[in-house]
Amino acid sequence: MTAYTRRELLAASAGLLLRDGPVLAAAKPMRGIFIIMATPYTAANEVDYEDLAAEVNFLDRCGVQGMVWPQLASEYSYLSKPERMRGMEVLARAARGKKAALVLGVQGPDIETALEYARHAVSLQPDALIAMPPGKAGSLEDFRAYYRALARLTNLPFFVQTTGGAKGIVPSVEFLVELAREFPNFGYIKEEYEPVLARMQALAAQKPPIHSVFSGAAGKFLLYEMRLGFDGTMPGAPWADVYAQIWELYQSDRREQARDLFAKLLLAINLDQEIPFSRSYFLKKRGIFKTSISRRGKAEFTPQAVAEMDFHYEALKPYLRA
């Protein structure tokens, strides 16, 4: 049994204990802003499980519809198996009783590894699972065998992320629809393969068996995607409350307000292309994490970079909920 510190347990919200038995978690809508959670680290570069649990409380205050961990923006490939297993346990505790759906990432380079993560995830009773294709694959049939093995394990809603697997193998729209027909709980797609919008439209035209079509890419095309009737996006954590408000404004037909707020958000999220680790900077500045440490590399910000990040932070500050 994993041992937790008193601070971790408090951060995970008192009383939210894991339920015993095989009963599935209550169904929640797979629609809206589903945040790809960041992974926090201590000054010693160890996973900060206290901050990870606290991130759930932050997202709950932000008003998002879902939270997802660990995926690419979570630096999942830099996490050890024990870290991923323990992280899922911490999040399951913290998310119990929250409105937002908890989606646990179970991808692995091969079937055996993915099944190990998936068995552990299912035992924690999340609201859904997600997996990228396997990295060790030589054909689309290898992708099919991988997802079929996962499908036989659970009837939880399951997101298929189209990117992140073996290079050169494209999970076609036809493949995704066939998988959803065979396993109805696999009709949830996070689409990132180019041409993204065309593929999303083709998938949405296949409802049912497709249930939800989400985008990634930091939600940079969120307004147009909502106009096209897609179901949501999976962006990063620093501006979760701003994404949530844009979604709420648009859904309540306040589209000019949604556009104006989205314009401010785009300036901030675009910084990550020019100022590496800006997301880590904002997570610390907002008090969500204690450090801005990333295992992808060392963050070194020039005075000019800090000034630019702070400039865009001030523009979004009036809209922050947490």
Image: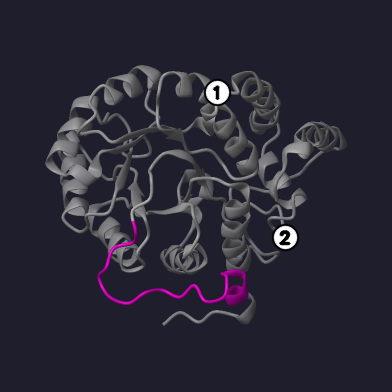
Between disc 2 and disc 1, whose residue precedes? 1
Kind of residue at badge 1: Asp
Q: Position of residue 121 (x, y in %)?
A: 34, 63
Above-or-below relation of 270 to 93: above
The stretch drawn in magenta includes residue 201:
no
Asked whether disc 2 touches disc 1, contact meaning CB atoms under 8 Å apart, the reply is no
Label 1 sits on residue = 253
In the rendered structure, find residue 32 and report the number of the disc placed on it. none
Of circles 2 and 1, the one toward us is 1
Query: In what element is the residue under mark 1?
Result: loop
Crowdedness near tag 2: few (<14), some (14–19) or many (≥20) residues, C-alpha within 10 Å: some
Q: Which residue is mark 2?
A: 290
The kind of secondary structure element at disc 2 is loop
Q: Quadrant of residue 194?
A: top left
Q: Name which residue type carries label 2.
A: Lys
Q: Is residue 98 left or right of residue 24?
A: right
Is the residue 208 above or below the residue 288 in the image?
A: above
Q: Between residue 80 and residue 321, name the one nearer to us.
A: 321
